[in-house]
Amino acid sequence: MTESSLPPQTPPEGQEGDSAWVSADTPFSTEDLKELCADPIRLLRINSQMEFKELRQTGPNAYSIKAKNLSNDKFIDTTFTVSETDDAMTLNFDGGIKTKTVFKIEESKKGALLKVIDDYTGTPIEDREKHLDEVDKSLLIWGGDLFKYFQNWKRWTWIPGWKWYMRRVWQPMKPSSRRIAYMLWMITAFEFAVFLMVLTVFVVERNVTAL
């Protein structure tokens, strides 16, 4: 599971002008990470601060998004197009004060690094100042979510059905549903551990009695 405990009030890792960014280390090569990041729907849904009502592809490189941003309590209803270069994918938004979000892949010592950049420079300054409450405050948490997602993807994909579960079950879940699922997994794991402990004690006592 990819639960994030970082507070939404925490500022992003970096800011310059009217853009902000956060970086997430990954255990993958640049080529493997590029393959994992090829789907913008996956990257957006990993963000635990977004509660999606709709997120779908409407045409070649065109998407529609309707969601509540839990970090600023604002509702998003817009469309965006996707453009790509060798090392980056850009979501170009048609509405709202955020002009684009860039996912840039860079090399690092431990593996490939994913840099997420929110850019507001395409919106006139006057409009930005009027809608400061619409600034996306989820960026740092999103970075933490991406980091945990990629770490878990590397760690658990050997388990049969893990990829299917993450793509078909976990990914479409609302953040609240993911938290509930996470707690249920923990409770189940605890109950199973207790069962094994009781079973072990029973077997040991039975063997001792038999002697």
Image (cartoon, rainbow, N blue to C red):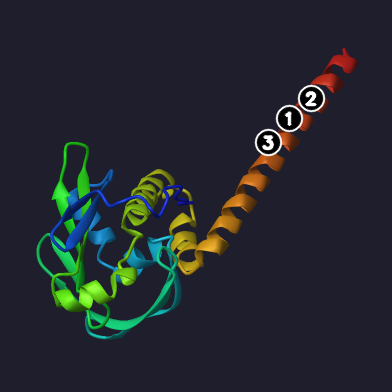
Q: Residue furthest left?
A: 86
Q: Residue furthest top?
A: 211
Marks 2 and 1 close (CB-CB < 8 Å)? yes
Mark 1, residue position = 197
Q: Nearer the viewer, residue 130 or 19?
A: 130
The amino acid at mark 3 is: Ala
Question: Residue 144: x percent and y percent?
Answer: 36, 49
Instruction: Give the Cα separation between the discs numbered 3 and 1.
Output: 6 Å
Residue beneath the point at 53% across and 59% down? 178
The quadrant of the image that shows the C terminus is top right
Q: Residue furthest right?
A: 209
Residue beneath the point at 60% across and 57% down? 180
Look at the numbered disc 2 and give the secondary structure of its residue: helix
Marks 3 and 1 close (CB-CB < 8 Å)? yes
Residue beneath the point at 14% across and 50% down? 106
Q: Nearer the viewer, residue 211 or 84?
A: 84
Mark 2, residue position = 201
Marks 3 and 2 close (CB-CB < 8 Å)? no
Figure check: 78 above or below 15: below
Whether residue 155 is visible, yes or no, is: yes
Instruction: Give the Cα separation between the discs numbered 2 and 1.
Output: 6 Å
Count the labels in the image: 3
Look at the numbered disc 3 and give the secondary structure of its residue: helix
Relative to 194, is 141 on the left or the right?
left
The amino acid at mark 1 is: Met
Graded by Cα atoms within 10 Å as few (under 14), some (14 to 19) or many (20 or more), the crowding at tag 2 reads few
